[in-house]
Amino acid sequence: NPYFPDQKSVFRDWKAHGYVDMRRALAVSSDVYFYAVGGGYAGQKGLGIEKIEEYVRMFGFGRKTGLEFAQEKDGTIPTPEWKAKQFDGDPWRIGDTYNTAIGQYGFQITPLQAVTATAAIANNGKIVRPTLLRDGNKDRDYMFELPFSTENFKIVQEGMRAGVVEGTAKALDVAGLKVAGKTGTAELGAEKRYVNSWVIGYFPYESPKYAFAVVMERGPVKNLVGSSAVVSQLLNWITIYAPEYAR
């Protein structure tokens, strides 16, 4: 503990995963891996809250997507300035960085922001403005391209595919359709008795055409039926009644 050297601060994972790399960490939703990436550990320096904010804003979090006819919210990206305003000048601590690195603490986003970012992962970095219009202007809908390599996106794509094949998004592993996905569980309240269950993803995996983001709000923490189960039903329906979407 950097503030009390005689004490230990323990940030636990949701289960023991052993050693993981980025692909495996995405597949099994390893909290500890992303704690280390975001806030650092021992001699390894983390990104820090400034870089975390910079990168998530690149992917469209914390701002409206521009969808027609929608009353959108900006959302919240936790920062030292945000914390000082919300908590009467309380300073930012390394634990706040750890929690922000896994989308917890004061992090608030919309499903529209999540699906826009997911589409950018699937298409190797193009941020596309969502539209409700059937014949949208493609020049207008294309916003900008993220400054990351195809190789870096491939690592994330492979991790999301592994999440479906053998990880926390296994419910999306349906016959006849290759899907990439990532689950998320946002704890609510001080007692953490309720959660928001999230899942994002895209398909078909080799030639992506469709991205999705589904959230089921405020369910009991011990409830075993989450957003992945809902998407699984949709994907199974597609393979039976609309197989053209699976190609």
Image: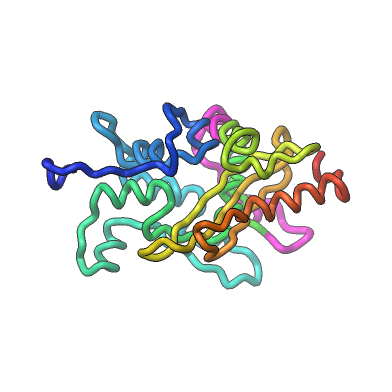
Question: Is 150 a magenta residue?
Answer: yes
Residue drawn 65% across the image and 54% down it: 141
In this rendering, the answer to whether 73 lies above or below 141 is below
Q: Residue 189: percent from the left, percent from the top?
A: 40, 65
Residue drawn 58% across the image and 37% down it: 167
Residue drawn 52% across the image and 65% down it: 218
Q: Residue 182: percent from the left, percent from the top?
A: 57, 44
Q: Residue 116: percent from the left, percent from the top?
A: 59, 52
Task: Classify residue 36 as left or right of residue 122.
Answer: left
In this rendering, the answer to whether 208 lies above or below 139 is above
Task: Classify residue 65 as left or right of residue 38.
Answer: right
Determine which quarter of the picture holds residue 243. Answer: top right
Looking at the rendering, the stretch of residues picked out in magenta corresponds to 131-156
Q: Residue 64: percent from the left, percent from the top?
A: 53, 63
Q: Residue furthest front?
A: 222
Task: Classify residue 242 as left or right of residue 64.
Answer: right
Determine which quarter of the picture holds residue 12. Answer: top left
Question: Is 47 a magenta residue?
Answer: no
Quadrant where the N terminus is found in the figure: top left
Q: Residue furthest right?
A: 241
Residue drawn 24% across the image and 29% down it: 43
Count numbered badges in the picture.
0
Task: Classify residue 100 as left or right of residue 221.
Answer: left
Who is closer to the viewer here, 122 or 135? 122
Who is closer to the viewer here, 50 or 167? 167
